Image: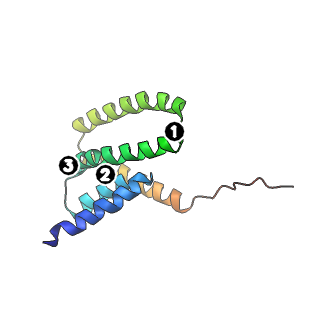
Amino acid sequence: MTDWLFPALCGLLTGILSSWGVGGGTLLLLCMTLFFGVEQRTAQAINLLYFLPTAGISLFAHRKNGYLDKAVLRAAIPTGTLCALAAAFLTTIVDSSVFRKPFGLFLLYAGLSILFEKKKNSKKETP
């Protein structure tokens, strides 16, 4: 009866992180592949479907709060779409094991850069 509890909690927590822009989708991928034994490509597909509603809700909230830069969006959307299509095509050609180590290194780098990030001063220092 509680077989659904841990996956539901993982989904809830990663959904919250995704809405904050922290990278909950990446954590969801790790949960699915490490704890639930889901094959990487299947986990990626599930993650993409999971991402759509959380991204939509977050986009609505950011628009409402005035955090969207329309000029950046006009440049980022076509570029991001083309890169996503190219990457999706590439993953159908190349064995997924080729991407495991580079992805792990990326996660390690991202985690360390967040951990050791220097805080920016919001006030200008006076001489």
Which residue appears farthest toward the bottom when viewing the image? 2
Q: From the image, which quarter does the C terminus lie in?
A: bottom right
* SS category of the residue bearing label 1: loop
Marks 3/1 in contact by CB < 8 Å: the verdict is no
Residue that label 3 marks: 42
| Amino acid type of the residue that numbered disc 2 sits on in the rendered structure | Arg
Residue drawn at point x = 19 percent, y = 56 percent: 38
Disc 2 from disc 1: Cα separation: 33 Å
Residue drawn at point x = 77 percent, y = 52 percent: 124
Residue mark closest to the camera, 2 vs 1 = 1
Other-residue count near label 3 (Cα within 10 Å), few / some / many at <14 / 14–19 / ≥20:
few
Viewer-closest of 63 and 26: 63
Total numbered badges shown on the rendered structure: 3
Q: Is residue 114 above or below residue 1?
A: above
Residue that label 2 marks: 100
Viewer-closest of 87 and 61: 61
| Amino acid type of the residue that numbered disc 3 sits on in the rendered structure | Thr
Which residue appears farthest toward the front when viewing the image? 64
* SS category of the residue bearing label 3: helix
Q: From the image, which quarter does the N terminus lie in?
A: bottom left
Residue drawn at point x = 62 percent, y = 58 percent: 118
Other-residue count near label 2 (Cα within 10 Å), few / some / many at <14 / 14–19 / ≥20:
few
| Amino acid type of the residue that numbered disc 1 sits on in the rendered structure | Leu
Q: Position of residue 82 (x, y in %)?
A: 37, 29
Disc 3 from disc 1: Cα separation: 32 Å
Query: From the viewer's perspective, is 3 left or right of 56?
Result: left
Residue mark closest to the camera, 3 vs 1 = 1
Viewer-closest of 36 and 1: 1
Q: Is residue 43 above or below residue 60?
A: below
Q: Position of residue 21 (x, y in %)?
A: 44, 51
